[in-house]
Image (cartoon, grey):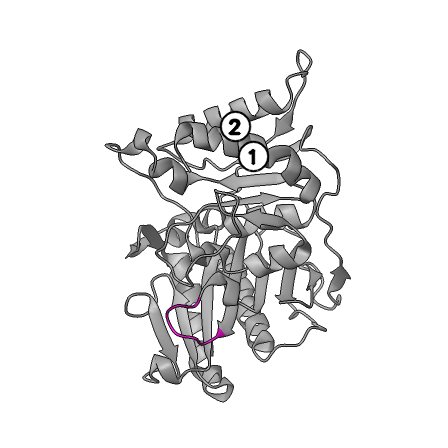
Amino acid sequence: MYQPLMCALSHPLLPLLIQLGSAAQKRVSRTLREHSAEERSLSTGHAGSDVIYAIDREVEADLVATLEAEAGALGGIVLIAEGIGENEISSYPQQRPHADCAWRMLVDPIDGTRGIMMDKRSAWFLAGVAANQGPEASLADIDCAIMVELPTSRAAVADQFVAVRGKGLQAERLSLLDPETPPIPFTPQPYSGPSIRGGFAQIARFFPPGREELAALEEEMMALLFPDAAEGEILSFEDQYISTGGQLAELICGRDRFTADLRVSLFQSPRFAERRIGHVCHPYDLASLLIAEEAGLEITAADGQPLNAPMDTLSACDWIAYANPQIRAEVEPVLRTLLQKRGWI
């Protein structure tokens, strides 16, 4: 049903990433066709702070089988993925010492599990690879990445993105209706205008706790940015896409202008000193960060510094993405002032 990405970029592990992404796409499509929502959403345990569902396990099994078959010829791969291996790190071929592997691979097999298992909205297969420099490797070391859309059963097309550091990105759109239709290349264009006013721009607040505080931050930010707002004017729209990969895809394709995920900063603030903290973003959610960077997005940590994090599944990380430098210049000073006032940074 699906055709693999036909890519002009070059990297030793890019064919494998494309193979893995295509397999995940096929598996999710088959699962949506053959299993009920109740079957897909059966919990099979926990990994880190997240729940692992039946649909996750199916894609993970394909991932492991492919790596076991292919990794040896590539010099060995250390896989970092939620719920796979001891401490969520494993090596392929199995039993190969981590230090003897040529590569490290950070993967989120289904980013947006809850949306896709209920057939509500696309999830994403995310992966990034770096030369194996040991456990100190970070997102900044990733030199090749892929994002593959895992579409709902109602979708007619699905997007795929690949990037190699310093060489740009390539995007293609697959037809899900006609298996003979070749993938159609397209060039993603982040929004190029000077303002978030009137566009999709949001601070992530997917679930409690903390939604009240995050909404209040956004309300104050918008009031300070646009004190001249007319009565009844809609200053911005929001899209709480419960997938970091999905959020980045919306920015890459110009549909969103600004997104910030600041849950870590909120939960580490004095306001939450004696309160239960909630779920946050982790580095594996940002395994395809390179693609957003190669697309030209301005992406920072909560304090405005360049975004980086360990290549792992457990570290907590915030991120802020601006569609272009003009929007960053508009939003960042106001947002930073508000974060400082609240003691979040």
Residue 106 lies in what quarter of the image? bottom left
Amino acid marked by disc 1: Gln
- The answer to whether residue 304 is left or right of residue 96 is right
Q: Which mark is residue 218?
A: 2
Proximity of marks 2 and 1: CB atoms separated by less than 8 Å: yes
Give yes or no for residue 291 being in the magenta stretch. Answer: no
Q: Give the residue at x 32% y 52%.
A: 43
Instruction: Examine the rendered structure and indicate whether residue 9 appears above or below residue 245.
Output: below
Q: Give the residue at x 34% y 51%.
A: 50
- Location of the N terminus by quadrant is bottom right
Q: Which mark is residue 202?
A: 1
Say whether residue 30 is visible.
Answer: no
Q: Nearer the viewer, residue 68 or 317?
A: 317
Q: Which residues are magenta?
A: 131-137
- The answer to whether residue 177 is left or right of residue 43 is right
* Position in image of residue 6 (x %, y %): 70, 72
- Location of the C terminus by quadrant is top left
Amino acid marked by disc 2: Glu
Pick out the residue farthest to the bottom.
Answer: 73
* Position in image of residue 182 (x %, y %): 75, 67
Work out how far the residue at label 2 is from the one at label 1, CA to CA, in angstroms.
7 Å
Q: State the SS at label 1.
A: strand
Crowd rating for badge 2 (residues with CA inside 10 Å; few <14, some 14–19, many 20+): some
